[in-house]
Image (spheres, rainbow, N blue to C red):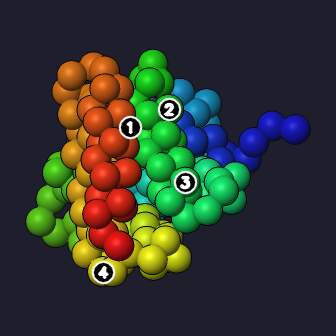
Amino acid sequence: MRESATERLTVTAARLFQERGLNRVGINEIIREADVARMSLYNNFKSKEDLALAAYGAVSKSRQDAVDAAIAASDGPEAAILAIFDLAADLAGGASFRGCAFIDLAAHAAVDDARLIDLVRRHKSALRGRFSRLAERAGVADPEKTARQLLALWDGSLTDAFIEGDAAPVSAARCAAEHLLSQGK
C-alpha cells in the first residue's frame, strides 16, 4: 500500500532537512521528491514550519524508539548507557550522517522559531531523562549531573564525528562515559 501524501511529505522533508538543513531545502523540492501535488502540501501543513515540526517530530520519535530498544536489549543500567553510545556510533557510521539533526536545527533556527526550538529542547530533555534514570539505577551519586555530562558527551561526539568524518569521537565518548560511571559511585 502506498503511503499517504502526509507520510510521503513528512518522510521526504525529514530526509532532505537532515541531509542539507532546514533552510537549504525548498518546498518545491519536497513536493517534487515526495511526488505529491502542491495542494496536498497545503492541505496537510499550513507552512514549512509545520512540515518541519512533523518531520523532526518523526525523527525524534524514531531516535527515541532506537534508544529505548538499545536500553531494553541491555543487561543493566550501565550497559544500557554504553549501548546508547553504541547507537551513536551506528548513526555516525551511516553514509548520509551529518551530525545531530537537532543540534543542526537549533543552530539554524531563527529567533522566532520558538516551536522548532521547543521540539529540540523536548528531544534533548527526553534523552537526558533516560540517562538520568539509568544513572540513578546504576547507583551514581548525582544522576542529574551525570545525565547532563553524558548528554554533553553524546552531543559533542556526534558533532565531532561529522566534522572529522569518522566515528572515532563517539568511541572516545563511550570510553569517557564508562569512566564517568565508574567514578560517579
Marks 4 and 3, how far apart at CA: 18 Å
Against 111, residue 33 (above or below) is above
Earlier residue among tags 2 and 1: 1
What's under tag 1, amino acid-wise?
Gln
- Point out the frontmost of discs 3 and 2: 3
Gap in angstroms between the C-alphas marked 4 and 1: 34 Å
Residue 68 in view here: no
Q: Which is in the foreground here, disc 4 or disc 1?
A: 4
Q: Residues within 10 Å of mark 4 (few under 14, many from 20)?
A: few
Residue under label 4, please give it: 142
Looking at the picture, which amino acid does disc 3 mark? Ala
Residue matched to label 2: 90
Q: Nearer the viewer, mark 3 or mark 1?
A: 3
Q: Pointer 3: what residue?
A: 79
Tell me whether circle 3 and circle 2 mark residues in contact (CB < 8 Å): no
Q: Is 123 in front, or is 2?
A: 123
Dot 1 crowding, Cα within 10 Å, few <14, some 14–19, many 20+ = many
Which comes before the other along the chain, label 3 or label 1?
1
Residue that appears at 61% across and 37% down: 36
Q: Is disc 3 in contact with disc 1, using a CB cutoff of under 8 Å?
A: no
Q: Position of residue 171 (x, y in %)?
A: 35, 33
Quick one: label 4 or label 2, which is nearer the N terminus?
2
In x, y percent, where is residue 117? 27, 66
Task: Give the quarter of the figure containing the N terminus.
Answer: top right
Q: Nearer the viewer, mark 2 or mark 1?
A: 2
Type of amino acid under label 4: Asp
